[in-house]
Amino acid sequence: MKSDGTESGTQLVKDITDGSGSTYWVSNPVFIPYGDNLIFTTTVNTNTLEIWFSDGTEDGTYVLLELGAFLTNEIYGWTEYKGKIYFQVVAPNSNSGLWVTDGTKDGTQKVVDVKTVPAVIHQDIVTIGENMLMSAISSGAGDAFTSVYITDGTDAGTMKISDADDAIFFGAVGDKMYYSAQDDSGRELWVLQFELTSAIRELSSAEITMFPNPTTGQIQFKGHDVVGFEHVAIYDMLGRLVYQSKYFGDTIELPSGLANGTYAVVLRAESGELYQQEVVLIRN
């Protein structure tokens, strides 16, 4: 139905379920304004969870995505980003992951193949800078703990930046994102500060090699574009900055007090582009 607030201006837009079947709204129905249009969820014949688009006309109201039984398929984290709507699907099959829609059937597709977590854990997407942050589990993971991912909305531009157990996002303030997560001492408040001014790419795409990896403390970079980088930052798997330098040449020494583990090395080029690669530190 649609209405302009008058009896004569209140009318049926489209019969969602043909014939004698009924349309049921899920327990938390979603209505997302998208420009002058609407994206919404519904459950048809008490079973199939669907995502629909409507421009307010019968011909312009159509299904975008059929997910399956609403008891085992859920949708979270609706976020508008770069002119499109992104959302996470929790499903018992390959539908699980980060999806995007531009309001068309062809433009509704899964863009990142990660395993989202059950409904008992918050599903969040937060936009910050030129990227989104989301909570998810890597595909094939055997536990129920989340990690924090940064994404530019593409599979190639998505990477894990924090092993935060059961992350619940509170929101972004400037270049910081606040969230709560579990650690050995219980649930605590965390802050993630990241260089989010541009999308992050893998270091190999800049034809630069980082070695040795694993390392005992020294990291070297090799490639003709090394001179084009002006800043290096190293983060632990909770997103905390542990080292940074404005100019590093082609060799850096990790802080002597840094514990063994996996770290994210982020290089910023003079153009502002960011490149990342993980390094494993193993000291005797």
Image (tube, rainbow, N blue to C red):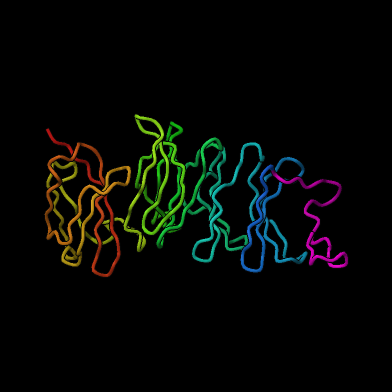
The secondary structure making up most of the magenta span is: loop
The residue depicted at 29 percent of the width and 67 percent of the height is 272
Whether residue 234 is in magenta: the answer is no
The residue depicted at 19 percent of the width and 44 percent of the height is 213
Q: Is residue 216 above or below residue 248?
A: above
**Residue 176 shown left or right of residue 61 in the figure:** left
Given residues 132 and 243, the one toward you in this image is: 243
The residue depicted at 39 percent of the width and 41 percent of the height is 189
**Residue 173 shown left or right of residue 243 in the figure:** right
Image coords of residue 179 (percent x, y): 42, 45
Q: Is residue 70 above or below residue 229?
A: above
The residue depicted at 24 percent of the width and 65 percent of the height is 269
Residue 261 is drawn in which quadrant? Answer: top left
Q: Is residue 159 above or below residue 138?
A: below
User: Which image quarter is the C terminus in?
Assistant: top left
Image coords of residue 146 (percent x, y): 43, 39
Whether residue 21 is in magenta: the answer is yes
User: Which image quarter is the N terminus in?
Assistant: bottom right
Image coords of residue 186 (percent x, y): 39, 31
Residue 173 is drawn in which quadrant? Answer: bottom left
Which segment did they paint magenta?
1-26
The image shows a total of numbered marks equal to: 0
Q: Is residue 180 above or below residue 156?
A: above
Given residues 188 and 95, the one toward you in this image is: 188
Given residues 94 and 277, the one toward you in this image is: 277
Image coords of residue 151 (percent x, y): 41, 55
